[in-house]
Amino acid sequence: MRFPALSLATSFLFTIISPAAAAAAPVISTDHTVAAVDERVIHFYVDRPDVDGKVPLLVVIDGSGCLGQRRPSSWGDYAPTAGDPVPFARLMIEKPGVAADAADPQAQCSQAFHDYYTIQNRVLDHLRVLQHLQAKAPWWDGRILLWGWSDGGDIGAQMLVYRPDIERAVLGAMGGGLTMAEHFERFWACPPEMADKRAECLADLRADFAGILANPSGSLVWNGESHATWASRLRSRLSSPLADNRVPLLIVHGERDHENTPIESARALVGDLEASGNTTFEYWEIAGMGHGWDALPPLRQRALRDAMLEWLFAGAIEPGAKQFVVNGRDAAPTE
């Protein structure tokens, strides 16, 4: 069972569907399509318990790359199970030009992916599917819980701008306080250690950025991804929109994340939110973790995954469990 010590904040859910009823219910998995405003076909997948009552919707948004949403996962991507103490449905929305079961990280991405995979398109696709489900999903109780990681964190943060009715959100490994351009300039391509060569490096890098922004084409590739994709990331800074956010938000980042999304970017976001007076967020900096949790000991991996899900439903977790998840100290949570 994934979150056995739910707080009293979730007890009202059981007035709709009892745990016993949910435990007996199989999970229904369905694939769907809906037209985007630009006439692209959006593919999306719903997994939900087969119960009589209505259930909340957990939106799961993964990171970059052209891997399918239905690919095998070592941790389950928060798929609902028949034994969940709080029954919920999961929504995953496919990336453009990607097959549902695409699982090879070395495979070439399709031209449709290069043309249409942008942060803004992903935000709009999620908003469109949510609108569609509100009209067509009688099993949904209208509540939205949101989990996003890496690019998915950036997408989820922007969704909070347009859907302030989201109940809670967990956004991980997204940085947000520095732009992607600043990541390259300060950490990846032209770090200060370059000394006398840094000015030339910055000039070349900024010329590349100017070319990307001037011609955000899906047919032009820079550093492994299309101009269209990079143009949607380079100037994205989440500090201002999240300062106005009032959706309870958990920000998660690994203290050893440097090559994917520098930890300094997450710390800058937290500093900006604190300076703005925003009190609706919580920050977990995970000791020993990089961009993902694979390098953590298996027990802490599971504890982190479970803790994020529990936080989504309850808005908090038990302090001892949090200490173990964040710092790896104290007794591990029991079964």
Image (cartoon, rainbow, N blue to C red):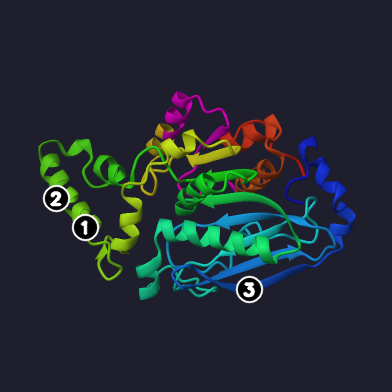
Q: Of circles 1 and 2, which is in front?
A: 1
> Disc 1 on helix, strand or loop?
helix
Residue 64 coordinates in the image, percent (x, y): 43, 59
> Disc 3 on helix, strand or loop?
strand
Q: Which mark is residue 31?
A: 3
Magenta stretch contains residue 288: yes
For badge 2, the amino acid type reads Asp
Q: Of circles 3 and 2, which is in front?
A: 3
| Mark 3 / mark 1, whichever is N-terminal | 3
Q: Which mark is residue 204?
A: 2
Magenta stretch contains residue 23: no
For badge 3, the amino acid type reads Asp
Left or right of 194 on screen, residue 319: right
239 or 172: nearer the viewer: 239
* CB atoms of marks 1 and 2 within 8 Å: no
Q: According to the image, label 1 marks what residue? A: 214
| Mark 1 / mark 2, whichever is N-terminal | 2
Left or right of 272 on screen, residue 75: right
| Mark 3 / mark 2, whichever is N-terminal | 3
Residue at image point 58% right, 56% down: 60
